[in-house]
Image (cartoon, coloured by chain):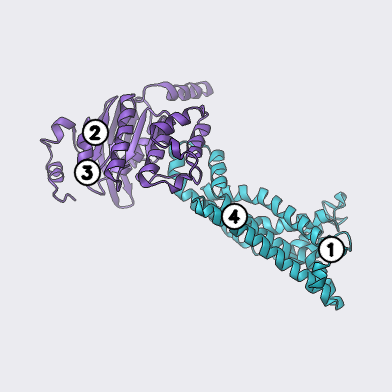
Amino acid sequence: MALVLSGNADLLEIVALSLQVSLTATAIACLIGLPIGALVAIGRFPGRNAVLIVMNALMGLPPVVVGLLAYLHLSRSGPLGFLGLLYTPTAMIIAQTILIAPIVAALSRQVLEDLHAEYAEQFCSLCLTRFQTIQALLWDARYSLLTVGLAGFGRAVAEVGAVIIVGGNIDHLTRVMTTAIALETSKGDLALALALGIILLIIALGVNAAVQSVRMTAARQAYV
Amino acid sequence: MAVTSATDATEAQSAPILPLAVRDLVLRFGDVTVLDGLSLDLGASGCTMVMGPNGSGKSLLLKLLHGLTQPTAGQILWGRHAAAEITARQALVFQKPVLLRRSVVDNIDFVLKARGKDRAQRDVLLDHVGLAHKADQPARLLSGGEAQRLALARALSTDPEVMFLDEPTASLDPASVLAIERIVNDARDRGVRIIFVTHDMGQARRMADDVVFLHGGRVAEHSPAPDFFPEPRCAAARDYLNGRIVV
């Protein structure tokens, strides 16, 4: 605990990079996943059930598999090797985005489909376009979608398999909390591993508490 | 062809949509026939009350006329247009108002923006329905009567030529009922064609210009209100008005 409170520069650097990577990945995953979730929620098209099955299945993507696929694409001999992204925070963001975009899409699809069931006839009566419908659904479900984003962030910040493969756990460059915990545990430096573990838990609790507080405020105004 | 389609679209936006002619309308869900060869003619103005026992297809008739549901067979002609072509020129107020999870004023703004209309008229509308003082309150915390008045204001913000109301005063207290009737009557006086589903006999007597009585999936009677209430022609309507159970 003393280490947590000490303001250790290395520790802070690791925490900051973890937050930067996972928050960026969550934001990008939301930009990708929410529109997909909305389109599937309001769309009726052949093969929709198959799409739902795939979306739900992708929620359980193993991080190491995502890491491996990202590695194969980003390594020098891969199709995106020319970008030189392997072992950079950008590669870690890409891997985490691949990992959590399906979670955001699948969970938001369920939230938006439930809301659309309530609004559909009214929206048809108002002759809204598909774009207007999606806009309205995303806005009206914003507080529920916060929880979806939180689920994505939780998955991102806690995963180790993907980021360690594409990031390489390089000190002062790609070392994040989870990869550092794995490394320090293997080295026997349990104090640092525990300190990082405590910070990870505090972040998880803090973000959850903040989102819950926002949702409760919204619920009091019947906006949820 | 493209020119023809563009002309059709323009015409659909401007051509008269009244009178209404419904011919041999059939609506089936699987083996269940809800409407069975319903025919109906409605004139260009006034307030038509649609009455009938539960399950007679009143609400579904409104949705068919509004273009929200497609009939199994038959024809609906608004002027020369099919129902689905002119949905935007009509408005439907549901029995349970569907309000967005936003403030009162944002519920109106949403429709005005979607329709590309000037937001300046929202204050007039809110004042008209008596909700100006609640403009910034969450819409879903309104009482039942207030919520329905907001739904009416939202419907009126689209400047509809026809307004459908599906039991908008069900479960409301008398003061709320009268407030809603006043708003609907004002709309009628401004030339909006009203088609109103109700079970409330007193309300029908107060508001109706003509009454359509549905029974057995058909129009059992369509009469001017002064004729219908004292002396309904069909037996089912007579029983209904006399408080007997009609199935």
At mark 4, the secondary structure is helix
Tell me whether circle 1 and circle 4 mark residues in contact (CB < 8 Å): no
Q: Are marks 1 and 4 on the same chain?
A: yes
Q: Which chain is cyan?
A: A
Q: Position of residue B92 (x, y in %)?
A: 38, 37
On residue B207, the disc is: 2
On residue A175, the disc is: 1
Residue at (52, 37) in percent of width and height: A129
What subunit carries mark 3?
Answer: B
At mark 3, the secondary structure is loop
Label 4 sits on what residue type? Val
* Image-based side of B124 in relation to B167, left or right: right
Q: Mark 4 sits on what residue? A: A214
**Distance between mark 2 and mark 1 Cα atoms:** 74 Å
User: Which quadrant, please, contains the N terminus of chain A?
Assistant: bottom right
In which quadrant of the rendered view does residue A185 lie? Answer: bottom right
